[in-house]
Image (cartoon, helix red, strand yellow):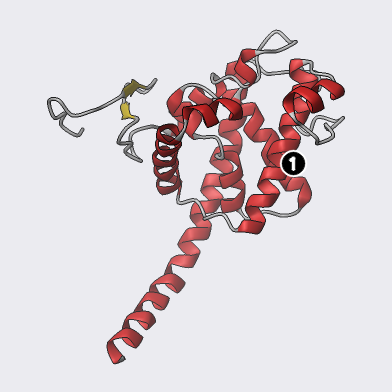
Amino acid sequence: MTAITKGAPRAFVLLRSRRRLDLLDPDPEAWTDEDLAGGLSRTMRWGGASQWEHPLSVAQHSLTVLAIREADGALTAGEGLRELLHDATEFMLGWDCITPLKAQLGEPFRALEARLQTAIDARYRLPRWTPEDYALHKRADRLAAASEAMHVVGWSRVEMRKTLGIAETPLVHDPLSPCAFAPWEPWPPRVAERLFLERFHALDHAHRSELRKLEPELRSSLVLTGAEHAAS
């Protein structure tokens, strides 16, 4: 564990694994996968507003976005993992900051989020977004949000457009809807954690396999690039 320098700025979070995560200087190895899944299953969307017994978790939202993107077409394991972890920084912060408030918090909050996202990207070796992929992701994210606003929180279509500025048409059918739960019903944290971890482990394992297959090709490319540079 990194020694603490007296007087150095820090903002530690004690995780369920008993590891400490410094939000100001996040170490990509400071948390376990169970910390991440458990945190996201207990982080509430929509400020906790819900018509149901439970609020909607970021874990369930992340699975919904992934399902919408998978319905658009095949994803590599790395692309699927990137979708699943698109809000992973929120487990570190312990809250899902709504977009209008982010604008008020300004550059310091954006810089904090960027540092946390960099740690996530490094830990799971996520592929970088292309402009095309990011546009598809944002469409899925907005579609999930529109559906949640209606089916989970209880906004009407008119209120969504006028008050929230949401123009997307909500989905009728829940792309998840596991047994024992009604469509769009928020799951208890223990269920959200378990289902999130199942998809995470499958995607992470497949993504690591993809990377291992690419490593010889990447090493060859680096050697060739080095030889070309030396010759010049």
Crowdedness near tag 1: few (<14), some (14–19) or many (≥20) residues, C-alpha within 10 Å: many
Residue beneath label 1, please?
Answer: 68
Q: 223 or 118: which is nearer to us?
A: 118
- Quarter of the view holding residue 222: bottom left
- Quarter of the view holding residue 45: top right
- Quarter of the view holding residue 98: top right
Residue drawn at the location 30% of the way across and 36% of the way down = 25
Q: Is residue 85 left or right of residue 69?
A: left
Q: 31 or 190: which is nearer to us?
A: 31
The percent coordinates of residue 167 (x first, y second) are 80, 35
Residue farthest to the left?
A: 6
Residue drawn at the location 50% of the way across and 51% of the way down = 126
| Callout 1 amino acid | Ile
Q: Is residue 3 left or right of residue 29?
A: left
Q: Is residue 191 left or right of residue 102?
A: right
Q: Secondary structure at mark 1?
A: helix
- Residue 179 visible? The answer is no
Residue drawn at the location 70% of the way across and 18% of the way down = 186
Residue drawn at the location 39% of the way across and 40% of the way down = 115
The percent coordinates of residue 211 (x first, y second) are 48, 59
Total numbered labels? 1
The N terminus appears in which quarter of the rendering? top left
Q: 88 or 188: which is nearer to us?
A: 88
The percent coordinates of residue 55 (x first, y second) are 65, 14
